[in-house]
Amino acid sequence: MNLVLIGYRGTGKSRVGMLLSACLRMPYIAMDAAIVERAGLSIPEIVERHGWAGFRDLESREAQELGGRDNLVIDTGGGVIERPQNIEVLRENACIFWLKASVETIVSRIRRDDQRPALTEGKSFTEEVAEVLSRRTPLYRSAADHEIETDLLTPRQVADRIVEIWNARCSSGDAAAT
């Protein structure tokens, strides 16, 4: 069974994923990094050349491939939930954790990130985060087996909570939501 992390950028997926990988002795895969490596282009370059739809196509291919593997910690891109088929293929062999944070926390954590082009036109950075997060929240909620608020927790604390849940419920195949 795979352990999948979903959530908006800045919620801690990458740092928590690496901690989980070390703790659980499971390989760590960052989907965005895998896409960049396979495409030979940065995410801004992919979006510039092929648009967001082209990037989402690459993301769907990566989700399909990773969904067929086992015993991985998978750090998904924030928009993986934009296409329901991505969650369907990942869910087949996974326990999915939604890492959540407030707009203010997300903005403070990703303010200097220049590796992602804008998702909306004509909005301030904070307005964009709020708008996209509002639209994606129901998708994250419906995809998740478990939800973890990260605003006031360190990555280690988030990882420790996930390990507790994983050891108690998910690794045995019981992915009932909490």
Image (cartoon, grey):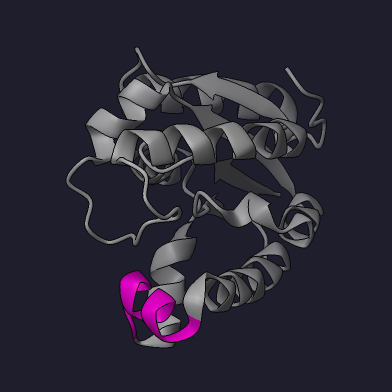
Viewer-proximal residue among 2 and 113: 113
Viewer-proximal residue among 114 and 22: 114
The residue under the point 49% across, 63% down is 31
Residue 12 appears in view: no
Residue 112 appears in view: yes
The residue under the point 70% across, 32% down is 138
Q: Is residue 176 magenta?
A: no
Q: On the picture, is 95 further left or further right than 12?
A: right
Picture quarter containing residue 12? top left
**Chain part drawn in magenta:** 41-50
**In the image, residue 100 lies at what x, y percent?**
50, 26
Q: What secondary structure prevails in the magenta region?
A: helix
Q: Which residue in the rendered view is the most extreme toward the left?
A: 112
**In the image, residue 103 lies at what x, y percent?**
40, 25
Viewer-proximal residue among 128 and 108: 128
Q: Is residue 48 magenta?
A: yes
Q: Which residue in the rendered view is the most extreme toward the front?
A: 122
**In the image, residue 113 lies at what x, y percent?**
23, 51
Tally of numbered tags? 0
Quadrant the C terminus occupies: top right
Picture quarter containing residue 110? top left
